[in-house]
Structures are given as C-alpha cells and as structure tokens.
Amino acid sequence: MGRTTSGSRRLLKWVGNTLLAVLLVWTLLPFYWMIATSLKADREIYGFEATLYPHRPTLAAYARLFRTTPFVKYVRNSTIIAVGNTLASLALGCLGAYALARLRFPGRSLIARGLVVTYLVPPALLFIPLFSVMSFLRLIDTHQGLILAYLSFSVPFSTWLLMGYFRSVPLELEEAALVDGCTRLGSLIRVILPMSLPALAVVTFFSFTQSWNEFLYANVFVNSVEVRTITTGLSLFVVEDVFFWGPMMGASFLSTLPPLIMYLIFQRWVVKGLTLGAVKG
Amino acid sequence: MAISAGPRQAFRGDVLVRAPVLGRPRRSTTLRQEGWLAWGLLAPALLVILLLVAYPFFAAIYLSLQDKMVGAPGRFVGLDNYLALFRDDVFLRTAWNSVVYTGVAVALKFVLGLTMALILDQPRRYNNVFRTLLFVPWAVPVVIVALNWRWIYDDLSGFLNNFLITFHLTSDIISWLADPRLAMACVIAVVVWSGTPFYSMTFLAGLQAIPKELYEAAEIDGASTIQQFFFVTVPRLKTIFLTTVMLSTIWTATNLQFVLILTRGGPGNRTEIFPHLAYTTALGARRLGMGAAISLVFFPLLVVLIVLLTRRMLRPADE
C-alpha cells in the first residue's frame, strides 16, 4: 500500500508539472506576441512575410509611437487621474473607516452595508445617468471628473477594507493615546495608520490600478485628446481603421508596466487583501 | 432579596435605575459628540456614494421609463421600453448570449483557476516564480488584454493563423472572430485568460489555510488522493468557492470591454451581450431611455448576488 501511495504521488507530481507547463504557455503566449510584435518592422508584421519572432528586432515601432501618436499625453492623463484618485480614496477611506470601526453612532451598520452594496453595483448600470451628473457638474472632459467618477468604486472598497483592518488594531493602544490627551484624529494618524500599512498598501494598489485600467467611464465622460486616458486612447488606435499593430503593441506593453510593477511590489499584501473579500474579476 | 429572586433581571434593573444619576449624562454627551464626529468623517464618502451611485441608480430606473433621446426631452412611457425589449429578436438573442457567455466563462474560470491553485499548492522549487507568472494577466488592463487578443486572432497576420499555417496545421485562413460558429468561443477564451488568476489567487490562499494534519489523518484512514480532495479540500473551500463565483459572475456579466473591442457584438449579433447592447443603444443609437432599460433588465438577477455577497463580506465584522 505504501508503494502505491508513493507511486500515485509521483504520478500526481508528473501531471502537475505537465499542466504547469501548459498553463505557463497559455498565460505567457499573449505577452510574447505583444512584445515580439512591438519589436518587428512592418514588413515582418503583415502579409506573406509575417514572422513568428522578430528576425531583425527594431525599436522603430516605439519611435513611431512617441513621435506620431499622443501616447505620452495619454500616459500623463492616466497618471494624473490614477494618482489623484489614489490619494483621494486613501483620505476618504481612512476617515470613513475610522468612524465605522471606532465610533458608535446610530446607523453605523446600515452604512457599512450600504458601502458594500455600492461597491457591488456595476458601472455598466450607472454610466448613462452618470453622464448627466457629470454634465451638470461641468466635469465632462476634465481630469477632476474622472477622478471623481472613479471614487464611486474606490471609496466604497477602501472604506470597507480599512474598516476591517482598523478593527483589528487593539483598542488598548488607542485608549492609551486618548488618555494621554490625543484627539480622535490624532490617534487615527499616530496610532492606527502606522499599524495598518499593509491595508494602506492594498488600497493604494487597487485604487491606482483600477483607475489606470478603467475604460467605460473614461470612454463616456471624456472626448478631448487633452484628457483622454491610455485605455481609451489605445482602443481608438483600432477604430480609426488604420491598424498600427507595431506601435500599438508597444503602447500596450508600456502601459501594462505600471500596474504590473505595482503588482510585483505589492503582491504579498494584495493576495491577503483579496482573501479578505476579493476584488475585480 | 433581588439577587435570590432573579439575579440577572434584578441586577440589570438595578443598573438601569441608577444609571441616570451617575453615568448617563456624561456618557450620552460623549456619544453625541462621537456621533457628530462620525458623520463628519463619513460625510465625504457618503457624498460620493449618494451623488455617483445612489442618485444615478434611481435616475436610471426613471430614465428607463421614458423614451428619452440624447439632446431631447423625454416623455414618460411607463413600461413600454421593457415590453418592446421582450418583443425584440436582437434582445432575446442578447439575453441568451449573455447567459451562455457568463455561464461558460465563469465555469471555465472556476475549473482552470482551481487546477492552477492545486498545481501551485504542490511542493516544487521556484513555485513563487511560477505563481507570480501565472497571476500576471490579472494585473493587465482589460482593454489591453482584448486588443492583444484581437491581434492574436487577426485573419491575415495574427499569431494563431500564422502559427497554424507555418506548421501546416491548416491550409485555409480561419477568421476566428468573424466566423459565427467560432466568435463566441473566441471571446470567452479571452475572458477566461484574463479572469482565471483571480480565481486561482483566492483558491490558493484557501488551500494554504487548510491544516496539513487533516490530509495526514485522512491518509492514515486510507483515503485516496481523490477522496481527500472531495472530503477534505472541497468542504474547506466551499465559502471561498461561493464568494469568488458570485463576485466574478457580477463582473463577468457586466463587463462590456471584451465584446466592444473584439467583435462589437458581431458577427450577426452572435456575441452581443447586455452591457454592450446597452452601450450601443444609449451612445450609438442615442436612445438613452432604452439603453437604461436594457442595462436594468438583468439587474434583478444581480440583486440576489449582491444581497448574498454583502452578507458574506460583512460577516467578520461584529455587526
């Protein structure tokens, strides 16, 4: 019997390694094709001479991307909006979460529930009337408008996540600070926040990447090139009927880097944050 | 006397009687102060939610009862938009497509995600590296995923045809996204590619939280690997399975980017789904009222998920 278990274990290991190889190919192939395309000259990209790998690698596509398209502008806009949204959701999230985690007032559990519901209501349902709200506030075609629109999903998420985390900070620590004459806000900043760095990392990661990756609101609430973000900008490369696949794959690769780098840095905490309740499909 | 009669009640009554004299005034002022402070701290977040989620939500319902077009005042038409939808062939096709799209994509993501998690849970050298690599699609913006795959599927120069022809696996060019029989499957493949890591991340975290002693005990009792999976692993992961599937169902069903970029609903509405139909109706055909109605039709189904999820996501809280 001992032999069969070790035999079946070896079989499992073998099956596992094979599947791992298949999954790695499946996962990484699109990246390979993206990067390979971005390093080819047009001759190798299209038609009969199309190649499976760049025979003569060149950075020409990148040169064209920077010289002839508003790519840099798009990146600038995405950065402004993602950073603005991240800072605002950290601030609003911390204040709201502190109230929900530490203060007692009527309606507290109702608000906590409302937050989660809000987070789960999909943007696909809201974008039509939200357009009138944005027009009414004169926020169409502005960075502030998109920052605000993205707060509608980043604030509920960050408040909910931080609330759970703040609760786990021992009450005694805060009481000591309060007895020593610290105000409520003082104890939030000096006691609770320093102990909640992992949660703040998760909030930073999600606010930034969700703003960076968002498409629907960016597409509906912005028309001008001056404010257009990278996701809508890229999708317009195709719609304009001329297919610049070389520069486009270069742009795809470059604009994947910020969320990718953040993922690599914040990985450890993000996976923990996910298991707390989970984000983004 | 009171203690022997009914200890708890008497004691409680005692405190209640004494409370106003001693503790209560001071306590209620701090409570009231805390209440003000709490509302002050929550005000910005609540404002955001009321303005950007609650109001638009009810406005969407109201809009769906009008025949509003872009730039023109709407007329109240009651349920006409909804009734018209159910007589519309494109809509009925869309409804069926949405069910297939969401159902198949979620099922595949689940199976693939669980496989991935089980593999990564096996002891192996460099497992950290493999895990990081397999989870990478999760960090890639969906628009870029869709564009990238559109290029892979490209008829003339895309990777798939290029590869198949180079290795003589096909002699004809296959139009992946334009073939009515293939288009939906091709779109779903992209959705699965992009969404699987989310499943494996949560599943893997769940697997790693299962105490190893449980497996040892099961093995001593003579349970086979398959039995261990069904009687130890699955019961332990049930909660994570449910939460992940519910969240992912909401997100999958309401994401329009894959369809918008890959097929625009074509060929011949074969890949048309609710969010995309709402989008084209409202912004392309400029029929705002009808667009709102389309996006709201599937909402009742989502409500069930949202209610169940809200309960789950707040469970660790002491409400």
Image (cartoon, helix red, strand yellow):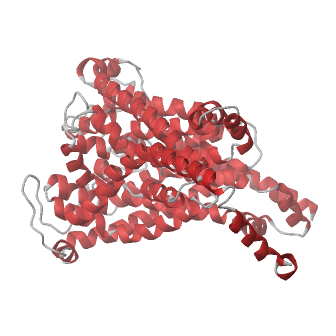
Q: Position of residue B202 (x, y in %)?
A: 61, 52
- Residue B162 shows in this picture: no
Q: Position of residue A101 (x, y in %)?
A: 59, 49
Q: Is residue B25 left or right of residue B75?
A: right
Q: Is residue B75 above or below residue A259?
A: below
**Residue B276 lies in what quarter of the image?**
bottom left
Q: Is residue B249 above or below residue A228?
A: below
Residue under the point 19% across and 45% down: A136
Pick the residue in front: B160 or A89.
A89
Q: Position of residue B260 (x, y in %)?
A: 28, 50
Question: Which part of the image, by quadrant, shows the C terminus of chain B?
Answer: bottom right
Residue under the point 33% across and 43% down: A149
Residue under the point 58% across and 63% down: B312
Pick the residue in front: B68 or A87.
A87
Q: Position of residue B154 (x, y in %)?
A: 32, 44
Pick the residue in front: B131 or A3.
B131
Q: Is residue B30 above or below residue A202?
A: below
**Residue B303 lies in what quarter of the image?**
bottom left
